[in-house]
């Protein structure tokens, strides 16, 4: 069974109603992104950061997976599919995909500020004073600006073993995630689906690149149809 690795970004979630700071001049829900999505912001004002992610978690409960999420899940009927996402929502899971690498963490999980390995599922708010089993403060399980990306190596390995790459709803400007296409085998077909595609160095050097200037909900089902036809 051929392996498809799908790199997804904010664009696929935006079509379900999740806002992205890159569409609003560096503001995210009226906050400067560095105040709520950086390790320095956390150290400056923990309560602000906790409240921000509490609100994001509540919003997540009001949105649903869209046609692009569902189409990616349908690919699993004919391919081995690995989703590598920069998104922290659970829309891929709810859309039916079963193998997902979250590069930037997960909104519905929390972890200890001291013991990184202590990670917990969490649907309710996090408050100052909420602690892990070892007594240290809990924080969102999110990779902020200024922090390492622990899942990057696992994602790079997956890309290096891919037969086909899909890039969906990402500007391909945020590194190190944007560098992942560079790990793909030289002649691996790459489909780039985005209404405003940006060709970075890694994409520009691909020998088998197909660009689809479409929203995810339009472009992904089209690619699904083509890929499923190829496997019949």
Image (tube, grey):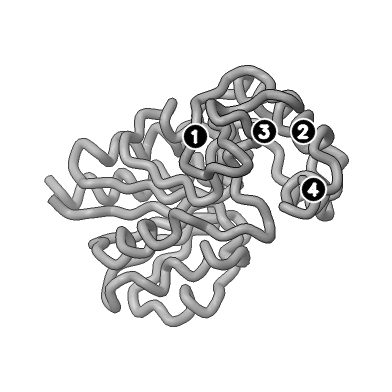
Question: How far separated are the C-alphas under marks 3 and 4?
Answer: 13 Å
Disc 3 crowd, CA 10 A, few/some/many (<14, 14-19, 20+):
some
Question: How far separated are the C-alphas under marks 1 and 2?
Answer: 19 Å
Question: How far separated are the C-alphas under marks 2 and 3?
Answer: 17 Å
Tell me the residue that label 4 is attached to: 43
Q: What secondary structure is found at the residue carrying circle 1?
A: strand
Q: Nearer the viewer, residue 178 or 231?
A: 178
Question: Do tag 1 and tag 2 residues touch (Cβ < 8 Å)?
Answer: no
**Numbered tag placed on residue 137 in the rendering:** 3
Q: Nearer the viewer, residue 147 or 112?
A: 112
**Numbered tag placed on residue 119 in the rendering:** 1
Residue in view at x 24 percent, y 63 percent: 161
Q: Quadrant of the C terminus?
A: top left
Residue in view at x 49 percent, y 34 percent: 119
**Numbered tag placed on residue 48 in the rendering:** none
Residue in view at x 78 percent, y 44 percent: 36
- Which mark is in front, 2 or 3? 3
Residue found at the far front of this picture: 134
């Amino acid at each position: 069974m051929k392996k498809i690795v799908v790199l997804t970004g904010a664009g696929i979630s935006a079509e379900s109603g999740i806002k992205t700071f890159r569409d609003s001049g560096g503001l995210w829900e009226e906050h400067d992104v560095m105040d709520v999505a950086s390790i320095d912001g956390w150290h400056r004002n923990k309560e602000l950061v906790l409240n921000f992610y509490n609100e994001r978690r509540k919003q997540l409960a009001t949105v649903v997976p869209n046609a692009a999420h569902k189409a990616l899940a349908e690919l699993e009927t004919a391919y081995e599919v690995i989703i590598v996402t920069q998104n922290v929502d659970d829309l891929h899971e709810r859309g039916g995909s079963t193998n997902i690498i979250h590069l930037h963490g997960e909104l519905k999980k929390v972890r200890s500020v001291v013991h990184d390995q202590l990670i917990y599922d969490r649907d309710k708010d996090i408050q100052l004073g909420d602690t892990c089993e070892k007594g240290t403060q809990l924080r969102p399980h999110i990779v902020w600006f200024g922090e390492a990306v622990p899942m990057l190596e696992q994602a790079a390995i997956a890309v290096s073993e891919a037969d086909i790459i899909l890039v969906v709803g990402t500007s391909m400007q945020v590194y190190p995630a944007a560098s992942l296409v560079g790990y793909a085998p030289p002649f691996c077909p790459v489909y780039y689906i985005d209404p405003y595609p940006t060709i970075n160095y890694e994409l520009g050097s691909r020998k088998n690149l197909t660009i689809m200037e479409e929203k995810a909900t339009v472009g992904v089902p089209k690619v699904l149809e083509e890929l499923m036809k190829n496997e019949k």
